[in-house]
Image: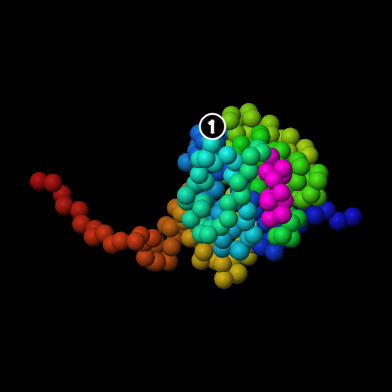
Amino acid sequence: MSNPKLEVLTPKNSQLIFIDHQPQMAFGVQSIDRQVLKNNTVGLAKAAKVFNIPTTITTVETEAFSGHTYPELLDVFPDQEILERSSMNSWDDQKVRDALKANGRKKVIVAGLWTEVCNTTFALCAMLEGDYEIYMVADASGGTSKEAHDQAMARMVQAGVVPVTWQQVLLEWQRDWAHRETYDAVMAIVREHSGAYGMGVDYAYTMVHKAPERTSSTHKVLAPVPAK
């Protein structure tokens, strides 16, 4: 008997949804550093752009409570429609259901705020009523406490959700470094968003392969001058 969860994520079999990456929602996040959360979210968005992954962005009560989606996220997808909702559960909005269906892919990668509310309710309903496979990006999502995030992840995993991280998704889409058409773009994301891994790539490029530094400006280096 085949198990679809044994299939790796590819650019052809998956779609992505960002749920409520809005400032008021981020203010309540205590499970992950909020700047790290934004870094990971934008890194995931850039990865989706590189691999042409169908992407949905949905928001809740933007004007009344939550504020506007991270501008860094929106800038990755210029002219993207934002699907506004009133319900905490994205599955309750017909626009969201229609967008997922139109993308025609059963593997839905999810990143959102908060893990224990908006992510969990959407995941459970999308699996139960929409027959979707849910891949929850744990480090591009956040809860109101570490306990809230962890227990929500545990509940979803028990229900069949697959936990992943943003960089895992990026590299699973790339799969093979021989895929040169996306190699440079993936490395650019890694260098900007992948912390120590990205620093290591920068070091290897410049010190081992003698590539130019990754800067947009030039800087004159002054030689050491011992003090008298």
Q: Is residue 4 left or right of residue 154?
A: right
Image quadrant where residue 157 sits: top right
Q: Residue sitting at 47 percent across and 49 percent down? A: 71
Q: Residue sitting at 20 percent across and 53 percent down? A: 224
Q: Residue sitting at 47 percent across and 51 percent down? A: 72
Residue 179 covered by magenta stretch:
no
* Residue that carries the numbered disc 1 in the rendered image: 28
Q: Which quadrant: the N terminus?
A: bottom right
The answer to which of 180 and 46 lies nearer the viewer is: 46
Residue type for callout 1: Gly
Q: Residue sitting at 55 percent across and 48 percent down? A: 41
- Point out residue 226 in the picture as x, y percentages from the top left corner: 15, 49
Is any atom of residue 57 visible in this view?
yes
- Point out residue 207 in the picture as x, y percentages from the top left corner: 39, 61
- Point out residue 26 in the picture as x, y percentages from the top left corner: 52, 37
Q: What range is drawn magenta here?
A: 89-99
